[in-house]
């Protein structure tokens, strides 16, 4: 049986985290788009609007937040989910504005990647172990550069659908 991830459901989850309104005055508007990433034999990537994903697919999320308010936005946070059944692709996140990237890991909260936890080895000694990206629940950018009036921030990241 093949597992299919409903991209529409993932987009609804992300959009529920922030309001979406077309060209609404005095509001921050948000848009999340998902694309299936394909690579040809020459290594050239192409993108197709995602409706469904299958095991092994790489999905690129593109998030846009537009400032339609009357003033610049500061201390702006952009949040992206890492849906169940997917893993964040390390080093795939980017932002057009100056931002710090953090990832959320259960029981460890928000941290800059890579994230480490302490575990016991075979002898009972505490060792520092890197948390695999498959355990990331969400990512976020802490935007440190103001978003000017009538300007947008663009962020993107990738996840891989589990086999």
Image (tube, rainbow, N blue to C red):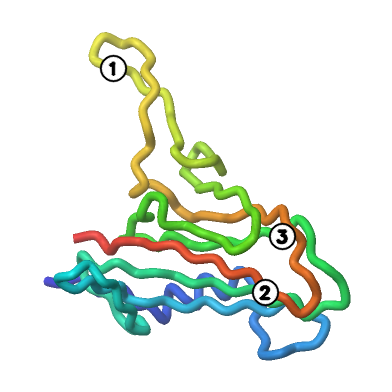
Residue 120 drawn at (x, y percent):
33, 18
Disc on the earlier residue, 3 or 1:
3
Residue 17 drawn at (x, y percent):
60, 69
Depth check: give the residue in front, 156 or 40. 40
Q: Residue at x 45, y 36 (%)?
A: 115
Residue 18 drawn at (x, y percent):
64, 72
Q: Residue at x 52, y 76 (%)?
A: 32
Rendered-image quadrant of the C terminus: bottom left
Instruction: Determine whether 91 is above or below 26 in the image.
Output: above
Residue 79 drawn at (x, y percent):
58, 61
Label 3 – label 2 distance at C-alpha: 11 Å
Label 1 – label 2 distance at C-alpha: 47 Å
Question: Residue 76 shows which numbered tag?
Answer: 3
Instruction: Determine whether 86 is above or below 9 in the image.
Output: above
Rendered-image quadrant of the N terminus: bottom left
Are the residues flagged by discs 3 and 2 in contact, CB closer than 8 Å?
Answer: no
Badge 3, how many Cα within 10 Å: few under 14, some, many 20+? some
Q: Nearer the viewer, mark 1 or mark 2?
A: 2
> Badge 2 is on which residue?
152
The image quarter containing residue 6 is: bottom left
Local secondary structure at mark 1 = loop
> Badge 1 is on which residue?
121
Badge 2, how many Cα within 10 Å: few under 14, some, many 20+? some
Q: Nearer the viewer, mark 3 or mark 2?
A: 2
Depth check: give the residue in front, 105 or 40. 40
Q: Residue at x 67, y 74 (%)?
A: 152
Instruction: Determine whether 53 is above or below 163 in the image.
Output: below
Depth check: give the residue in front, 54 or 150. 150
Q: Residue at x 42, y 23 (%)?
A: 118
Count of labels in the image: 3
Local secondary structure at mark 3 = strand
């Amino acid at each position: 049986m093949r597992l299919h991830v409903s991209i529409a459901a993932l987009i609804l989850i992300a959009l529920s985290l922030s309001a979406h309104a077309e060209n609404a005055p005095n509001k921050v508007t948000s848009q999340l788009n998902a694309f299936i990433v394909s690579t040809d034999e020459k290594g050239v990537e192409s993108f197709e609007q995602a409706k469904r994903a299958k095991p092994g697919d790489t999905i690129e999320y593109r998030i846009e937040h537009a400032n339609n308010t009357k003033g610049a936005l500061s201390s702006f946070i952009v949040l992206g989910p890492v849906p169940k059944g997917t893993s964040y692709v390390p080093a795939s996140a980017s932002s057009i504005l100056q931002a710090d990237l953090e990832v959320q890991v259960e029981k460890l909260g928000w941290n800059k990647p890579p994230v480490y936890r302490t575990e016991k080895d075979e002898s009972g000694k505490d060792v520092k172990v890197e948390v695999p990206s498959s355990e990331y629940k969400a990512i976020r950018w802490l935007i440190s550069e103001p978003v000017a009036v009538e300007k947008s921030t663009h962020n993107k990241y990738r996840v891989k659908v589990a086999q």
